[in-house]
Image (cartoon, rainbow, N blue to C red):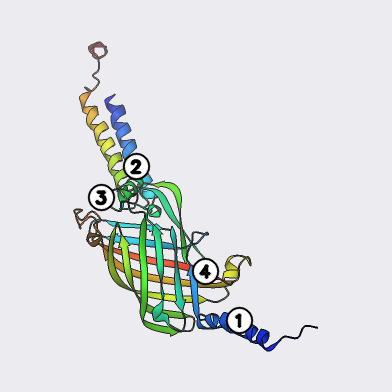
């Protein structure tokens, strides 16, 4: 019968400790993937000018966010919106929108929000409100932004969403903020009475964190 | 011809206004697709999909109105039909 020697037992204990330590340190850290095969995630935009209101949406959302429940301020990650997925209901307007003077989605196919941290974090059950700091990148121009967001953790709800195929948590983020199209070189010559300078963006996205 | 053109102009004007009014008299541009929102009951997010459907806007109304005006204007190029002298003599 095999009886472990002192050195074998120590080695085993050491192995367990080495493997367990990073896990316990990272226990509160969770990564959520926002790529949504169902196409539910979306960003809407609204330009409300005195003479014309332009609204549209985009559903090409992807990216990941890593959240540490013990240190929410250290939240980091990137949310990407595929510029070609921007849609407005008028076909001619959509063609203009994707053109060189406006979004130029062929040259700049990604609209990115890089999250560098959270502040003003307030927790209420599984829902939190916070100010998300980061950089917003659009049409090749990057600007620092700080936007309000409502974050809801739905523990164990991934199974319900995937009909039991995957177990894990969902994270729902909602945020509405305003940027200026002139800051990002989106046809700054366009008259502001017809096309507003301010673009109101609303994000409603859910990320999945499958159990490994 | 004169009368036919005017009748056609009136028909186009009425049809355009009726079509635009039936679509809810929207003051925006015409739409080639319409947003359909459905609620995702797990996340509470409204999913937005687009249905390919034409909805007339003010530009359609303007085109219909312009077509009616052109046809009505064209009708003045034709002289009114006169009764022939032979018919008067009778």
What is the C-alpha distance between the residues marked 4 and 3? 36 Å
Query: Which residue is found at the position 53% from the left and 68% from the top?
Result: B41
Numbered disc 2: what chain? Answer: B
Give the CA separation, mark 2 to mark 3: 34 Å
Chain designation of label 3: A
Counting from the top left corner in percent of width and height, residue B68 is at: 28, 36
Q: Which mark is residue A208?
A: 4
Q: In the depicted view, which residue is nearer to us: A52 or B6? A: A52
Label 4 chain ID: A
Q: Residues within 10 Å of mark 2 (few under 14, many from 20)?
A: many
Residue on which the image places disc 2: B16
Residue A153: % across, % down? 49, 76
Q: Report, in whole angstroms, how far the alpha carbon at label 3 lies from the one at label 1.
A: 60 Å
| Left or right, residue A33 beside residue A164 | left
From the image, tell me which residue sits under label 1.
A15
Q: SS of the residue at dot 2?
A: helix
Q: Nearer the viewer, residue B14 or A124?
A: A124
């Amino acid at each position: 019968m095999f009886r472990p020697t002192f050195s074998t037992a120590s080695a085993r204990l050491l192995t367990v400790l080495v493997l367990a330590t990073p896990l316990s340190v990272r226990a509160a850290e969770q990564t959520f993937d926002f790529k949504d095969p169902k196409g539910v995630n979306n960003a809407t935009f609204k330009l409300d000018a005195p003479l014309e209101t332009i609204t549209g949406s985009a559903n090409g959302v992807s990216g990941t966010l890593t959240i540490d429940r013990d240190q929410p301020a250290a939240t980091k990650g990137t949310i990407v919106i595929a510029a070609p997925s921007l849609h407005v209901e008028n076909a001619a307007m959509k063609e203009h929108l994707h053109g060189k003077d406006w979004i130029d989605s062929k040259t700049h196919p990604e609209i990115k929000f890089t999250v560098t941290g959270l502040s003003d974090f307030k927790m209420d059950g599984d829902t939190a409100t916070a100010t998300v700091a980061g950089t917003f990148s659009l049409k090749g121009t990057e600007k620092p932004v700080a936007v309000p967001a409502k974050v809801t953790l739905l523990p164990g709800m991934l199974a319900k969403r995937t009909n039991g195929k995957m177990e894990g948590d969902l994270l729902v983020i909602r945020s509405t903020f305003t940027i200026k199209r002139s800051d990002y070189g989106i046809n700054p010559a366009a008259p502001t009475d017809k096309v507003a300078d301010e673009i109101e963006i609303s994000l409603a996205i859910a990320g999945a964190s499958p159990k490994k | 011809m004169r009368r036919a053109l005017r009748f056609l102009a009136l028909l186009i004007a009425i049809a355009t206004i009726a079509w635009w009014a039936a679509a809810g008299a929207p003051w925006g541009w015409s739409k080639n697709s319409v947003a359909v929102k459905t609620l995702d009951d797990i996340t509470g997010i409204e999913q937005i999909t687009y249905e390919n459907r034409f909805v007339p806007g003010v530009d359609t109304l303007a085109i219909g109105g312009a077509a009616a005006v052109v046809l009505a204007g064209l009708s003045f190029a034709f002289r009114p039909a006169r009764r022939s002298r032979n018919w008067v003599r009778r």
